[in-house]
Amino acid sequence: MRSRLLFVLCAITAANAPAVARAQSAPPPAAPASGTAAPAAGAAGDAAKAPGAVDPSIEEGDDMSMTFHAARPADMQEFAQANLQEIQVGKLKPRYALNFFGDLSLGASSKTEGITKPDPAFATGVYDILFNAELDSKVLATSEVTFQYEPSAPLAELERLHLRWKPSKAFFFEVGRFHTDIGYWNVAYHHGKWLQLPIERPRTILLHGGLLPVHWVGAQTGVSIPVGGGSINFVTSVGSARDPIGVGGHQTHSAAFTPVNGVHAKLEAAGIGIRDLHIGVSGIYDRIPAEEAIVRPGLPDTGIDEYIGNAFIAFPSVPFTAIAEGYIIQHQVTKGDLSSGEAGSKWRSYSVFALLGYTLGIVTPYVKGEYISSRQGSDIPDAFYIPEPRASVPTPPSVALDLVEGTGGIRFDVNTWSSVKVEYRATGGYAQRIPGTKDLIHTGTANWSFGL
């Protein structure tokens, strides 16, 4: 039998029954090829065994085509690992996966809230490019870049850039910029709206304007212990959680050396008893850098201690999907940091959100609810979230500190690689960023997203 070059397409849908994708084989060139494609192994094989990942079962027909069965991926990284392809360069056989995500929306709201306006308007979402490369059997390189259109100028951001060393299934060590591994949602659905059920992330973990440090620059390590068909996973990291904002800037991690100002840990039980079930707790301590009076007039030249606690339960399965997370965030100034009356002040925020969805063929109705409440132990509000509390013209807070919000929607998987979502959202409390206003805001949004 002639040798064949096999290019594998992993079909991923949200239907009750697994989707099926076919890749026809083709003969290779007469001379030896410099690269060959083959079904992914190694890390991709590990991902295939994870909850919600691609099922590696293969059927062969008379025409020697290959049929791959796949369920909806549990998260972005599993999706990427399941698509790793093998190439050969000399004696080396690195494997790589290149994935793209994007979306477009049409929305309107009863009042201006965030980027949504009363008049119907279109918006281009974030275009995400994710690249994974297995440099050898133990080293994985990951990079992720996003592009977003702004009327003034295009905006590109480096989301991830890290190297991971994984000598065994039980241990890994990585360095670089990665998604903060707190809770479930932040790592599973960081970018790529096509992967998550609702259109937007919960406000607590918004990438811009959320309550948490969703990115981390530093070193991270983790261990995994097999237990009862699943595993107990422990991850911890050290590095930079919050960078200085600076005059005229915004909080982000740059290419410069960043201060080591935080530690993080997460303990999770995954797939024990029930394959797709994740239950865990996680936490962060970091030191928010001091800022000049022009940046943070409410608390100038003073560092802030930040403590974050979290508990979560997630069942990202098909047909039933359920995710719930709760957070406590405390900011405080110790007496040694400041001699004014604000010394010893504490500000605490509470947040909880939950998502439920059920897939019926290509249709998945879902509901999401979120509650955020803040308490202050000082004459001024939280100086990190609201840096200018005493301005003559108060600047609306950039985050939602008091909020009750409910969302209902329907997702239609129009084909293997894209989905249309239609949502209605009702928001009450502080969400519209106008203190003292409690009117309910009604928002309708339609979104078409893709991933490949």
Image (tube, helix red, strand yellow):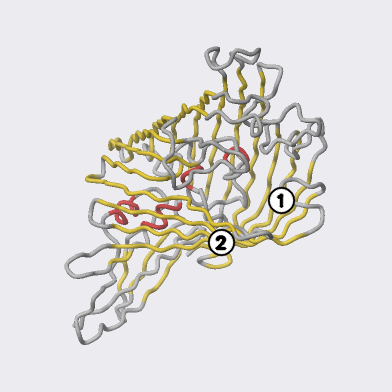
Residue drawn at 65 percent across, 29 percent down: 293
Q: Where is residue 400 in the image (x, y as percent from the top left)?
A: 68, 36
Q: What residue is shown with label 2?
A: 102
Q: Which of marks 1 and 2 is nearer the N terminus?
A: 2
Most distant residue in the bottom direction = 30
Q: Above or below — where is 310 with respect to 377? A: below
- Is 202 situated left or right of 265 in this image? right
| Numbered disc 2: secondary structure | strand
Q: Where is residue 19 in the image (x, y as percent from the top left)?
A: 45, 64
Per the rendering, the mark at residue 445 is none
Q: What residue is shown with label 1?
A: 115
Depth check: give the residue in front, 37 or 338.
Answer: 338
Amino acid under label 1? Ile
Residue drawn at 41 percent across, 60 percent down: 70
Residue drawn at 54 percent across, 57 percent down: 156
Amino acid under label 2? Gly
| Numbered disc 1: secondary structure | loop
Quadrant position of residue 103: bottom right
Label 2 crowd (10 A; few <14 / some 14-19 / many >=20): many
Q: Where is residue 409 in the image (x, y as percent from the top left)?
A: 67, 51
* Camera-nearest label, 1 or 2: 1
Q: Above or below — where is 137 with respect to 273? A: below
